[in-house]
Amino acid sequence: MHELETREWKIWFRWVKAHAGTSGNELADKLAKEASCKIDLPISYNRVPKSVIKRDLENTSVEIWQREWVKTTKGRIRKDYFPKVAERQHTKINLTQNFITMVTGYGNIKSCPQI
């Protein structure tokens, strides 16, 4: 189960098998079907565009990821190159063998002959 908190919302994402007798899921299906048939429903919520909810969830996810990235003791070298998760997401990187070797510390970079 994944949990995200944003603004005043607390949202849990959990898979539920459809039509398996899960009471909350069955009730949600029943209410959705009833609401879809009614034209004169009073507005009982503030309309929020999907794009706003999506952006809030993405931002919250990146914040959670960043906290975990800062806390972890693994990937020290990678953290030096990519300290901020959000910036790394928007950075185009040409992944060459030498770059991967430098970032991970694994591999063999041929040394230049000394002059």
Image: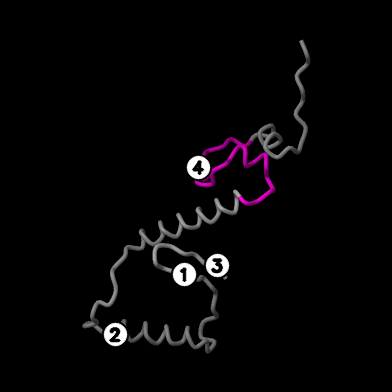
Sequence order check: which comes first, mark 2 or mark 3? Answer: 3
First-in-chain label (3 vs 1): 3
For marks 4 and 2, give the CA distance. Answer: 46 Å
Residue identifier under label 1: 11
Q: Residue furthest left?
A: 40
Do residues under tags 2 and 3 come within 8 Å of each other at their CB atoms?
A: no
Residue 110 x %, y %: 77, 25
Q: Earlier in the sequence, mark 1 or mark 2?
A: 1
Q: Earlier in the sequence, mark 3 or mark 4?
A: 3
Residue drawn at x 56%, y 53% is 67
Which residue was labeled with disc 3?
2
Residue in view at x 31 percent, y 83 percent: 35
Q: The residue under label 2 is which amino acid type?
A: Cys
* Circle 4 SS class: helix
Residue that badge 4 annotates: 87
Tell me, for residue 37, which label it has, or none: 2
**Does 75 appear above or below 20?**
above
Colour convention: one colour
In the depicted structure, whether residue 63 falls above or below residue 26: above
Magenta residues (range) = 71-95
Which amino acid lies under the numbered mark 4 shown in the image of this protein?
Glu
The reply, left or right, for residue 63 in relation to residue 41 is right
Q: Between disc 1 and disc 4, whose residue precedes? A: 1
Between marks 1 and 2, how big is the CA–CA gap? 27 Å
Q: What x and y, as percent, mark residue 12?
A: 50, 71
